[in-house]
Structure formats: C-alpha cells, structure tokens
C-alpha cells in the first residue's frame, strides 16, 4: 500500500511532463525566442524608465507566448489543408513545415481545438491585464491575434500573398515591444519612442528568420500557390534581400543612437554582427551557385547543411541582438 502511494504521484507527474513535452514539440515551443525576446526588450525599456512590475510582466509573457504557439498551430492547420506541408520532403526543425498533421500524430480537429484553447488563454490574460492597465491592452492583444491567425488562415492568408514576412516582423517587433512597454508603464509616453526604436531591429531580424527559412520551401510553396517573397524572387535576389535584412538592424541602431532615441550602451549589439556575416556566408554558399553546381552540391547534402547553418545563425543573431539591446537599456 505504501509503495502504491509513492508510485501514484510519480506516475502522474511523469504523465503530465510527457503531455507537456508532447505539446511543446507540437507547438514548436523551442523557437519561442522569436516572441520572448521582444517581451524581454519591452520590459527592459520600461524598467529603464522606472516602470516595472513582475506580475504584469509575467502575464504579458504568458499571453504573448499563448498567441505565438496558437499561431504556430494555425499555420500547421492551414498549410496542411492547402497541401503545402504534404509536398515537402526536406524537413528540419527550422523549415519544411509542421509534421504533426502530415505524420498523423494529431488530426485537424485536435489541432484546431488546441489553437482555440491557446487563443482563449491569451484573451483571458488580456482581460485580466485590462482591469489594471485599461482597454488598450485588449486592442493590442486583438491586433496580435489577427496577425497570427491571418498569417495563413483565410480569407487574408497573408503569407500566401507575400505579406507574411512583414506581418511577422510587425507582430514580434513593434507590436510586442510596445504592448509590453504599455502594460508596464500604463501609458504611451516618451519612453514609447525608445520602445519603438528598439523594436525595429528585432522586428527586422524575426522577419529575417522567416525569410531565410523560406529558401528550401521555395519550390513547394510555389507549387501550392504560396507566394512568399522568396518564391517571388530569384535565388540571387532573395539572398541579397536576406543580407539587407540582417545588416539593416545595425544601421537602425546607429541612427537611433545618434538621434538620442536609444541609449549609447545599446551599441553593445555590434558584438553580434559576426553572426550576421556567418548567416550571409552560409546562405550565399548554398544558393549563390549556378543551377548545375547547386544540384550537384545538393546531392551531397552541401546545400542543406549550409541552409541549416544560415537558419541557426539567424536565430542566434535575433536572440543576441534582442538581449544586448535589453542589456543596453539596463545599463543606460
């Protein structure tokens, strides 16, 4: 009897952990730095102006995370419905579409119920924060929901008409940073201008993450009518566009510092610049070849390895720039 009493709770905890682990994989929670970095940045900007409350900050983080993970499931649901995920044969954790529906791990109904639950949780958090911070919190949360849902869902299907990259950049850049700042400060004041300036580099870099991961999906996206920017451009032009996306944040930061919109300590972000050049180098190595040489290289896995490296360096660049910006605000 005593042994059973010990095993029961342990078994229950293991089951709970297994369920959490499963849903973390299904929602691609491992890539939540895309949303958590701007949350941290918004909090850092507010703290530098003497406005920081732990509970509202944690609620903001939970709400943004729920919206992000819900949007990931919406993306899987509608990409599967359009056939985009089924015709991809080169999947990695970075690109190639979701696998939970293609592999039959979950069915569409289960996925739809999961993203509805996540969106409901985000809505509840918005309402809780609105009690103390005002109805603007609900409006900001609604804007985040619309960006996440309409990214792949009809009728807008923004990612299918070449607006997906800008939508993600706006959502996980200005919208998230300013929303978190507003929750902390309770108003949009002079500090909000700093929040906006700080949000632009992270917005550009999260758009770069989406952009770089569209390269290997280019043929599949075109085949199913998903006209991403990479699908619309030549590979050489798209590679140049990627270089612009990962280098532009440093120009924005320099300009904002010179105008007094960012503290001088945010120049720390230049420590992350080598990651941008590593991303550019790997992407050019993969797609800067002639078509014949690229096909030969692909057979040996060269293109895939360079693409994975470019994707990884872009994620690390976004993380590093966001955290160094946050540190810069804390140092003043």
Image (tube, grey):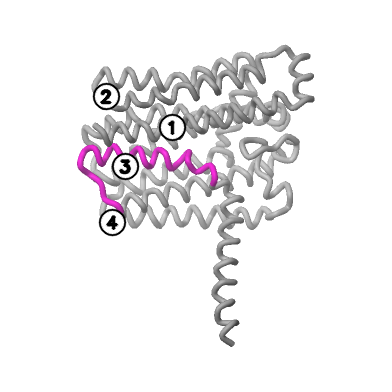
Q: Are marks 4 and 1 in contact (CB under 8 Å)?
A: no
Residue segment shown in magenta: 30-54
Magenta span main SS: helix
Q: Cβ–Cβ below 8 Å for labels 3 and 1?
A: no
- Residue for badge 4: 131
Q: Which residue is mark 2?
A: 264
Mark in front: 4 vs 1 = 1
At horizontal 56% and vertical 15% (from top left) the residue drawn is 240
Q: Is residue 191 magenta?
A: no
CA gap, disc 2 and disc 1:
17 Å
Q: Which residue in the structure is indicated by mark 1?
A: 320
Res 94 → quadrant:
top right
Residue at which label 3 appears: 43
| Sequence-first tag of 3 and 1 | 3
Q: Is residue 73 left or right of residue 128?
A: right
Instruction: Answer with mark 3 or mark 4, whichever residue precedes in sequence.
Output: 3
Q: Nearer the viewer, mark 4 or mark 2?
A: 2
Above/below status of 85 relative to 209: below
**Placement of 258 over or under 55, stated as above or below:** above
Q: Whole-Å distance between the Cαs marked 3 and 2? A: 18 Å
C-alpha distance separating marks 4 and 2:
36 Å
| Residue drawn where x is 40% and y is 24% of the image | 271
Q: Which secondary structure, mark 2?
A: helix
Residues marked 2 and 1 touching at CB (< 8 Å)? no
Q: Does the magenta segment cover residue 43? A: yes
Which is more N-terminal, label 2 or label 4?
4
Indicate left or right for 142 with 218 as reference. Answer: left
Callout 3 touching callout 2 (CB < 8 Å): no
Q: Earlier in the sequence, mark 2 or mark 1?
A: 2
Task: Find the distance from the CA under tag 3 to the CA under tag 4.
Answer: 19 Å
Residue 287 x %, y %: 66, 18
């Amino acid at each position: 009897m005593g042994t059973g009493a010990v095993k029961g709770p342990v078994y229950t905890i293991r089951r709970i952990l297994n369920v959490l682990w499963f849903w973390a994989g299904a929602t691609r929670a491992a890539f939540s730095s895309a949303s958590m970095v701007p949350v941290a940045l918004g909090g850092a900007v507010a703290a530098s102006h003497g406005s920081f409350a732990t509970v509202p900050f944690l609620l903001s983080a939970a709400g943004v995370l729920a919206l992000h993970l819900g949007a990931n499931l919406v993306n899987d649901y509608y990409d599967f419905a359009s056939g985009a995920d089924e015709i991809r044969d080169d999947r990695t954790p970075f690109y190639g579409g979701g696998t939970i529906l293609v592999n039959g791990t979950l069915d569409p109904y289960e996925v739809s119920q999961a993203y509805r639950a996540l969106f409901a949780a985000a809505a509840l958090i918005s309402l809780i924060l609105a009690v103390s911070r005002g109805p603007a919190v609900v409006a900001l949360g609604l804007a985040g929901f619309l960006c996440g849902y309409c990214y792949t869902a009809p009728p807008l299907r923004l990612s299918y008409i070449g607006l997906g990259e800008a939508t993600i950049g706006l959502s996980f850049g200005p919208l998230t940073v300013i929303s978190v700042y507003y929750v902390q400060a309770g108003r949009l004041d002079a500090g909000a201008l700093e929040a906006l300036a700080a949000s632009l580099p992270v917005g550009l870099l999260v758009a770069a993450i989406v952009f770089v991961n569209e390269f290997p999906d280019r043929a599949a996206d075109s085949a199913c009518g998903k006209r991403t920017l990479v699908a619309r451009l030549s590979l050489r032009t798209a590679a140049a566009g990627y270089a612009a996306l990962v280098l532009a944040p440093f120009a924005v930061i320099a300009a904002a510092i010179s105008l007094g919109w960012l503290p001088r300590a945010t120049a720390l972000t230049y420590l992350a610049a080598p990651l941008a050049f590593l991303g550019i180098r790997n992407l050019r190595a993969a797609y800067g070849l002639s078509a014949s040489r690229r096909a030969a290289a692909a057979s040996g896995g060269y293109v895939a390895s360079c693409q994975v490296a470019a994707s990884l360096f872009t994620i690390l660049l976004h993380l590093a720039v966001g955290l160094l910006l946050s540190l810069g605000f804390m140092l003043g």
